[in-house]
Image: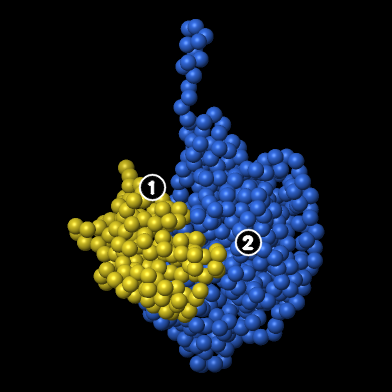
Chain colours: A blue, B yellow
Amino acid sequence: MPDGAAKEERRVETLEVNIGPHHPSTHGVFRAVVELDGEIVTDVVPHLGYLHRGYEKTCENKHYHNVIPLAERCDYMAASGNSVAYCLAVERLAGIEVPERAQTVRVIMAELSRIFSHLFWLGTHAHDVGAMTPLFYCLREREEIMNMFELTAGGRLMPNYVRIGGLARDLEDGFLERIRAFTETFDRRVDDYEALLTKNPIYIDRTKGIGILPTEDAVALGASGPVIRGSGVAWDIRKSEPYSGYDKYDFDIAVEDGCDVYSRYLVRIREMRESNRILRQAVDTIEETPIRAVKHSLVFPPQHEIYDKTASLIHHFMLVVEGMKIAPGEIYHAIESPRGEMGVYIVSDGGPQPYRLKWRGPAFVNLEALALMSRGAFLSDFIAILSSVDIVLAEVDR
Amino acid sequence: MNQESIGEKLLATFGEETIEETVLFQDQVSVTVSAEAIVAVCRFLKEDSELAFDFLSFVGGVDRYPATPRFELIYQLYSLKHNHRFRVKARVDESEENPASIDSVVEVWPTANWHERETAEMFGITFNNHPDPRKLLLPEHWTAHPLRKDFPLEGTDEDTPDLPREQG
């Protein structure tokens, strides 16, 4: 065959590559069909649902109190934050006031969860772009947070510690001292992670200018959390609609306007420092008040009362057997989870189970922006972009 | 603007023909609008400078079986500019000859795409003019709609005739 003919017959069609459902970068079971022109991504079609467990249907068939462990399994990387979101929604629906101390402890648990989640994100994200070392350092601090969860709540990954109306039990002795010790060293630990990545030329090459998500697209696609703050929108629900006493704490919203993977990295790094600041203030200002509201037909009475007060025993029994009854109505309550706007929408029909419970998972919505961010990028950058979204598949598929 | 005055503004703009019901519960207002007007109302909520609902939190459904109209669609909105929230609802019914359907709001808020795909497969509601009406979380061959109230939570094969069997 003459040379000219061979050139004309050069193949020009695009190639479809299947990434996932089992791929190390997906951190779960996520499948994306990536259309490639050479090495350039021309389109991404995500296929979800491998982890769909019929979450909302299950919640609709459980008593209000029994949903809490399920809520934590929705976003298992920030389990406490999720149960706080759910309990706040139910409390607002039923009109329950939570005591000061319980609110502060909820903030502590939620901020520990945020650091916990961002640490694991940082380690695996760095690993995805080829930096092996940060993961080991991140897991060291994450282990300490898990030990603290274990000390006071029993559970390590799923503390299952927040209850409707307050907390399951009071803090364990020595918990606050351990947090104080943790907060004193943690800022230096973050310096260590930054020393490995922030000015590392390889890391910057892999992330700067990659995965551009312009501000207006971020808003239009409903992105929230570090994804929208990395695109220049200073929006944090802890500031804009404070819940659980967040208005008492002095902290800043981390925001960057690079709109790229690197900006999202910087936002999360700064958020860890801000969370540390909140933790320090919370530990210093925590008050000695009861840890659970007193509201007989809605909130469980304290454990010790069940043993020596007949009325409390009866209330406890009725709550377990019949569940709490909330007046018909509907509520939407959102909190700032490590991934963004974590919202719970509950419809009550007056029965002991939520008539409808909808989770607005931020990871699910943020993932919608993946295709837009990836078009025009190299296939290897697609991995960095996917990891910069910080997906938790349990929350995406529900 | 507080939620009640947003509701009043909607009523003043669209009239009682379109705004069917306004409910205030625990400081949150839900406004039910007629299903035909959903895109017009959403566009107004987004484009009016006093309201500026540029952020859609989610689109969801509620099955009120056996009441009629059977389905409620929920549009939970937020304004980044004014920091206020609002909820719009629309009711749709289904019958043998008319399956439940409503116009898609993807052209107003692109994020509605996945929310509407999820609501469509979970409740069996068709979103007209949806740019990508495939299933999202469920397998393609499923014909059942799990979040409907008459879909059983558990049971034998005889109890769940709608449930897809394993494909041989």
SS category of the residue bearing label 1: loop
Task: Give x and y (percent) for residue A22.
Answer: 52, 43
Q: Residue at x 70, y 50 (%)?
A: A135
Q: Residue furthest top?
A: A2
- Give the spatial CA distance, label 2 vs label 1: 31 Å
Q: Is residue A318 above or below residue A153?
A: below
In the picture, residue B61 is in which quadrant? Answer: bottom left
Residue position marked by numbered label 1 in the rendering: B132
Visible residue check, residue A117 = yes
Camera-side residue: B77 or A279?
Answer: B77
**Tag nearer the camera, 2 or 1:** 2
Query: Total label count?
Result: 2
Q: Residue B67 — which label? A: none
Task: Give x and y (percent) for residue A196.
Answer: 77, 47
SS category of the residue bearing label 2: loop
Crowd band around label 2 with a 10 angstrom C-alpha radius: few (<14), some (14–19), many (20+): some
Residue position marked by numbered label 2 in the rendering: A234
Q: Left of A278 or right of it: where is A99?
A: left
Indicate the chain on which mark 2 is placed.
Answer: A
Q: Left of A118 or right of it: where is A345?
A: left
Same chain assignment for discs 2 and 1:
no
Task: Give x and y (percent) for residue A39.
Answer: 56, 31
Task: Give x and y (percent) for residue A184.
Answer: 80, 66
Residue type at mark 2? Ala
Q: Residue at x 60, y 46 (%)?
A: A212
Q: Residue at x 47, y 89 (%)?
A: A314
Crowd band around label 1 with a 10 angstrom C-alpha radius: few (<14), some (14–19), many (20+): few
Camera-side residue: B159 or A129?
Answer: A129
Visible residue check, residue A146 = no
Q: Residue at x 37, y 68 (%)?
A: B89
Residue type at mark 1? Asp
